[in-house]
């Protein structure tokens, strides 16, 4: 992914909740990542989502932190805050606790925002906390690669 972003001279930023910075850690584990990654936010609380990346409090109260609406606002907010080409956000319930009937453990929303599109994916993942977090990051990376290949080639 880093080489693909470098080849297209693209900057990416991240806003993460349930993955706690795992996506940003993945990105920065590669040499040359400073050319494509300037900042990432771990916005675990609603206040952090609102104060750091501008998620509307009405969205958080109406739909909850784990929702497509919040994920979409997170990706747009982080892209705007970082002035990056691509903003990626992750919000979900990694467990083992915190799930409900309507929002079970393993429910995750990933959103990607760029000048070309503003999309989200809903995942319903199985596994323990670590597996859910890693599967989420893998899907986010796949989203970025597919987006760049589709929109920048």
Image: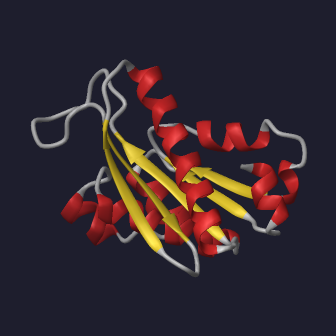
Q: Residue at x 39, y 54 (%)?
A: 46
For this view, does 62 lie left or right of residue 2?
left
Q: Residue furthest bottom?
A: 115
Depth order, front residue of 145/111:
145
Q: Residue at x 60, y 36 (%)?
A: 22
Count of numbered marks: 0
User: Against 143, is 74 above or below?
Assistant: below
User: Against 50, is 23 above or below?
Assistant: above
Q: Residue at x 79, y 36 (%)?
A: 29
Depth order, front residue of 123/23:
123
User: Against 31, is 144 above or below?
Assistant: below
In x, y percent, where is residue 34? 86, 53
In x, y percent, where is residue 71? 40, 59
Quadrant including the C terminus: bottom right
Q: Quadrant of residue 37?
A: bottom right
Q: Quadrant of residue 21?
A: top right
């Amino acid at each position: 992914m880093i080489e693909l972003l470098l080849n297209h001279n693209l900057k990416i930023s991240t806003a993460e909740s349930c993955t706690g910075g795992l996506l940003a850690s993945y990105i920065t584990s590669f040499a040359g990542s400073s050319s494509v990654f300037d900042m990432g936010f771990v916005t675990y609380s609603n206040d952090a989502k609102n104060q750091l990346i501008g998620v509307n409090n009405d969205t958080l109260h109406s739909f909850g932190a784990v929702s497509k609406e919040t994920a979409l606002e997170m990706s747009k907010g982080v892209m705007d805050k970082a002035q990056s080409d691509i903003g990626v956000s992750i919000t979900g319930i990694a467990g083992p606790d915190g799930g409900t009937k309507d929002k079970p453990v393993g429910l995750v929303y990933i959103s990607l925002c760029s000048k070309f599109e503003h999309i989200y994916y809903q995942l319903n993942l199985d596994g323990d906390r670590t597996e859910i977090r890693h599967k989420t990051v893998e899907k986010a990376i796949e989203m970025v690669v597919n987006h760049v290949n589709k929109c920048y080639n």
